[in-house]
Amino acid sequence: MALNLDQKKIIVSKINKISNTALSVIIADSQNISVNKINQLRKSGRKIGVKMSIVQNTLLSLAIKNTNFECLQEKIKGSTFIGYSMTHPGSCARLFKEFSKKNKQFKITGAVFEGKLLSDLEINQLAEMPTYKEAIIKLLLTMKILIAGKLIYTLSAIKQKKETS
C-alpha cells in the first residue's frame, strides 16, 4: 500500500525526532531475513533501549538531514534497516553484531557515533564498549584484586618479620 504525503511527513518527523536524541545509529541490510526473526530482534532491542525500523531510503535521507547522522546518507542503499541506540552508544551495535552471527544474510552496512561515520573496526569497538553497569563491575573487581594483593603482601611481610626476629 502506497503512502500518501501526510503519512510520509509523519514518518520523516518521527525519525528526525529520534535522530536528534539518539546516541548512535547502525544501518543494516535485512533482505532475506524472516519477519519472525526481525520481530525477535526488535523485541530484544526494546529491552535495551534500541529503536528500530525499516524505512524507505528517500524518507530516511530526509529524516537524518541536519542531524548528527547526516553523514550516513552515503551508505543508504537497498533495503535499509535502521537501529538507534537511545541509552548506551554501543547497545545497537552489539545487538546487530550478535544477530548477524546467527543470521548470515543480515549485514551491517554503516554506523555513526558522535557525527562520525565508523569503519568496520570502529563498529566492532563500539559493540564491545562496556555499559555503565559492566564498567562499574570491572572497576570493583579490579579494586578487589588490588586490595587482596595488598593484604597478601602485608601478611607475608608480617610473617617474614616474625621469622627474622
Image (spheres, rainbow, N blue to C red):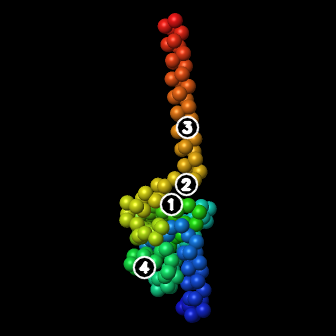
Question: Which numbered disc covers residue 131?
Answer: 2
Q: Is the Cβ of the residue at disc 3 closer than 8 Å to that at disc 2?
A: no
Label 4: element kind = helix
Instruction: Give the amino acid type for the residue marked by disc 2 in the picture.
Output: Thr
Please tell me in which quadrant of the rendered image residue 6 appears: bottom right
Q: Residues within 10 Å of mark 4 (few under 14, many from 20)?
A: some
Would you name the residue on which mark 3 appears?
A: 143
Asked whether disc 1 touches disc 2, contact meaning CB atoms under 8 Å apart, the reply is: yes
**Residue pictured at 37% horizontal, 65% vertical:** 119
What is the distance, in whole Å, between disc 4 and disc 2 at their CAs?
28 Å
Q: Residue at x 41, y 70 (%)?
A: 117
Residue with the mark numbered 1? 90
The spot of residue 32 in percent (x, y) is: 44, 73
Residue that label 4 marks: 73
Label 3 – label 1 distance at C-alpha: 25 Å
Quadrant of the rendering where the N terminus is positioned: bottom right
